[in-house]
Structures are given as structure tokens and as C-alpha cells.
Image (cartoon, helix red, strand yellow):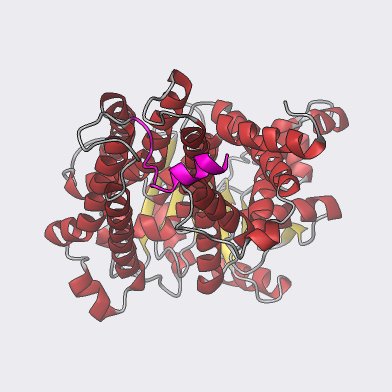
Amino acid sequence: MKPGFRQSMAWLHTWSGLVVGWLLFAIFLTGTASFYRHEITQWMQPELRQMAPAADAAAVALERLHGIAPGARRWLVDLPDERDPVAHLYVWRDPGEFPSFQREALDTVSREPVVARATYGGDFLFYFHFDLNMPSIWGRLIVGAATIIMLVAMISGVITHRRIFKDFFTFRPGKVSHRSWLDAHNVLAVMALPFHLMITYTGLITLMFLYMPWGRDVAYQGDQQAFLSEASLSTTIPAAANIAAPLVPIGPVIEEAVRRWDGAAVGRIDVYRPGDANARIELTSSDAAQIAFHRRKVTFDGTTGRIVAATDRNRWAAETQAVMYGLHIGRFAEPFVRLLYFVSSLAGTAMIATGLVLWVVKRCVKRDAPEKAGAGRRLVEILNVGTIVGLPIAMAAFFWANRLLPVERASRADMEAGCFFLAWILAFIHPILRSSRRAWIEQLAFAAFLFSALPIVNAATTGSHLGATLPEGNWVLAGFDLTMLATGLLLGWIAWHVGRKRPTGVGPGHPNRGLPVPAEINAERREA
């Protein structure tokens, strides 16, 4: 560690950012995509293209559940909205009954189950963002540790750069290589600094009881169910009376809940012990119209319609946590605000990427022979290529698999995920076999091809292509295709830009292992 406070902070910023930088890049990029996870799912299920929710969607969903699971322990309905036109039905049965769990997507207009290809859709990227698709809680613990280090890296970065806001207006693309990367890193960091701090801190808050459970455990003496019940995060399922009784009509129940919530819409319906005298109907408000991820609840007697419990307001601590959670996931955001979330998060992803590249480029400048990389720098170069370009390649492979795998194939959702991980593994193997410079160019060019050609593959395999979605004004599906095309063009431009520069003193056939270093490097060495 260097002497002096700012020098120590610079050391901390550099090494904390490097140690978890590749993981943070993956978290940020998949989190960025997750702001449009419902739209991604719609694109990955083109069979839903013409669907729209019915006005009586709740009644239609409960009628369907009456037909498929009349004696279940619990029904749950996620009602359709403007971002997801399908009602999602879930059924839990008592132990010993088969199947114990059942789920179904329902078209509330045709009253028929949705016949669409199996896919994890945008949820795959969403869950990868915070649990890395790892079993149990290990993925969430790893992501939490990386997020804490990210917060340390940002705070130490602000301390290190005394002229951080002045640096925002300084970008020298024609200067010495590492200065150009440093300027880009600074601009991206300052451009959305409040967002970066907010999204990182609130990411920790969302799972705070996983990382620091001791206060809760002491207050509730280890009884997690008591905590969840008091915090209105779970409801105890009543015991069956074993006396048949019909459910009350859902329409008047919903009207009463909306009246209590001053017009807020119902987002979820839970029915416990349907068809039994002890039935309960619990309505939960939609979270799409408010910043706080606080879902108000009201519980009705399922046979009389009488209100038996209601949670309309949180305590201050719970409400604060709900606001933090709501700010993080951005469910409340209208299209323009969601776009700002997306752009700001993309800037954070690029900030991490430029920091990782800057670490290598600065060490190229300091060495007399930048083409000769030591084992440590060579490892960083491989991880940089495999992460910064390899992860987008894996995401593109995920989308390609959705279109090319047979629709009726068993376990096709798992196969899509398998294509994602296989492509990512190959992206790490490739730079081991090639020089760093060639690996960057080849992977960037390949990623550009995958993204640019995706709308063509979509047109060849489905009817939901730009020629159909643009005239329809279907901006969800058309916007996805256009975004993929723009991403491919951007990656192609970067591949061309990297390919046209060569390190000083290295001939075309030299097996260079460093990143491209412009001719100005000699001037930098003379200054040093």
C-alpha cells in the first residue's frame, strides 16, 4: 500500500475494483438487461405477440383454477398488466397429492392456457444478476460480498479523483492510450454517479437480512416465520374445516380492495383453502404505480366476503426498506424513466469494463516491451476478453438458442441456459489460444455478427419480425430487434477501431500479447 491517504485510496480503488471487477461486470450487465426482463420474455415467446388482457381477467383466472385444482391448498394468480399480457396461475396441493405444485400461463381473452415455447426468458438474466444461478444461498452471498467491495471501490474512487467533476468534461481520445481509457472511465463514473451509488447500496438493502440476520434473530428468538408474518411478507395458511362452501364472487371483493387503496390496482390474488368453509382470499396491490415496493394487502373471508385483516401502511423502517427495494428494481418506472435506468446502468457496466482495461493498458505503458506480458497481466487479459466480450456473446447465444431449438423439445428452457454457459466457457478458452489483441478483435467481430444477425434469424423462424411488428406498432418486439441491431453495429465499430491500431514497434506478424497501444506511447515514455 502507498503512503499518504489519497495514495492509499488509489491503491484500494485499483485492487478492490480488479479483484471483483469481472463478477461486477456480469452483475451490472445482466442487471441492466433485467430492467426489460418482461419485454425480453415477450420476445422469447413470440406466440404471445397478439395477446391482450381481458377486462374480467381475475374472474377468468379463478374460473380456470376451479376447473384444474378445486381442492388445492392454495391458489395464486399474478394478474396481467401492460407489460405482461398473460395471467400466471400457481397451485399448491397438500403433501401426498400429485402434482404438489402446478403452474400455468393463461390467455384471459380466449380462456385457454397459453401454448408457447418453454423458456426462462428475461427471468434467467434477472436471477443470474443476484444469485448467479447457483444453488441455495451461495450465489447471493457471493454477489453481496462483491457489492460491498463495489461500494468501497466507488467511495475510494471519489476520494482519489479530487477533480472528478472537472474530469467529467475532459476526454482525450487522441492522447496516450492509458489517458484515453482513464478519461473514459472518469466520464462514465461521473455521468451517473448518483445512480451508481443508489443502485449499489439499495442492492445490498434488498437482501440485508441474508447478510446481517442477527438483529432479526435476536428480536424474534430465531422464529423467522413470526418475523415474516409481522412484516406482512407471508400468510399462514388456515387449517381446512373439511366443510364444503363456495367462494364469494371475486368482483365485489376486488372493488372493495381498490376503494381501500384509493384506486390502486390489484396485482395478485391468493386463495387459501378454496372451496372450504375456512377459505381466505388475500388481495395484494400492484407494485407498478409507486416507488416503494410495498404491496398493501387485505384479506377477506372466502365464503362471506368479510374483511378479516388488512395491511395498508408499513412502519417507518419497513417503509424505508420498501422504498430502497423499489428504487433498485425500478418497477415503478414509466417508459422514459426506465430508459434512464437502462442507460445509467449501461454506463456503470462500461465504467467497470474501462477500469479493467485501464489496469492492463497502464502496465503496458510502464513496460519497455508491452508485447511481453507476465503471467499476472496475461491472466487479467484473458479474463477481460472472456468477460467483457464473452458475456455479451453468451447472451446472444441464449437468444439464438431460443429461436433455433425445436419448440416442442423437452427441457428446452434448460437447453437455452446451457447454450448461454457453453458459449461463455468457450469465450474464456479462446483468448488462451490466441494473442490478446487477436482475441479482442475476433470476439468483438463474432459478437457483432451474433447481435446483428439476430433480427434476421428471428425473421426466418417466426412471424414476429420487424416487417410485421413495426407496421403493428408493437414496440416491445420491434424495439428488441432494433436494440440487437444497434448493439451489433456498435460492437462491429469497436472491432474495426481495435483492428486498425497496432502497438509501436510490433510488426504485423509479431505475436503481440498486449492490448493495442497507439504510437503516442513513445511520447509518454519520454515524459516519464
Q: How many discs mark residues in the rendered view?
A: 0
The N terminus sits in image quarter: top right
| Residue under the image location 65 percent in, 46 percent down | 203
Q: Is residue 330 toward the left or the right of residue 108 in the image?
A: right
Q: Is residue 245 toward the left or the right of residue 515 in the image?
A: right
Q: Is residue 403 toward the left or the right of residue 210 in the image?
A: left
Q: Quadrant of residue 7?
A: top right
In reply to whether residue 520 is colored magenta, the answer given is yes
Q: Is residue 476 toward the left or the right of residue 195 in the image?
A: left
The C terminus sits in image quarter: top right
> Furthest residue to the right?
219
Q: Residue 471 in the image: x percent, y percent? A: 24, 80
| Residue under the image location 25 percent in, 39 percent down | 412
- Would you say residue 20 is visible in this rendering? yes
Question: Which residue occupies the foreground of this view, 360 or 455?
Answer: 360
Above or below, comparing residue 380 to residue 193 in the picture: above
Above or below, comparing residue 98 to residue 192 in the picture: above
Q: Residue 109 in the image: x percent, y percent? A: 34, 70
Question: Which residue occupies the foreground of this view, 251 or 106?
Answer: 106
Q: Residue 99 in the image: x percent, y percent? A: 39, 34
Question: Which residue occupies the foreground of this view, 424 or 299?
Answer: 424
Q: Residue 466 in the image: x percent, y percent? A: 22, 70
Q: Quadrant of residue 310?
A: bottom right
> Furthest residue to the left?
460
- Would you say residue 299 is visible in this rendering? no
Above or below, comparing residue 260 to residue 312 in the picture: below
Instruction: Give the residues in magenta.
Output: 513-528
In reply to whether residue 388 is colored magenta, the answer given is no
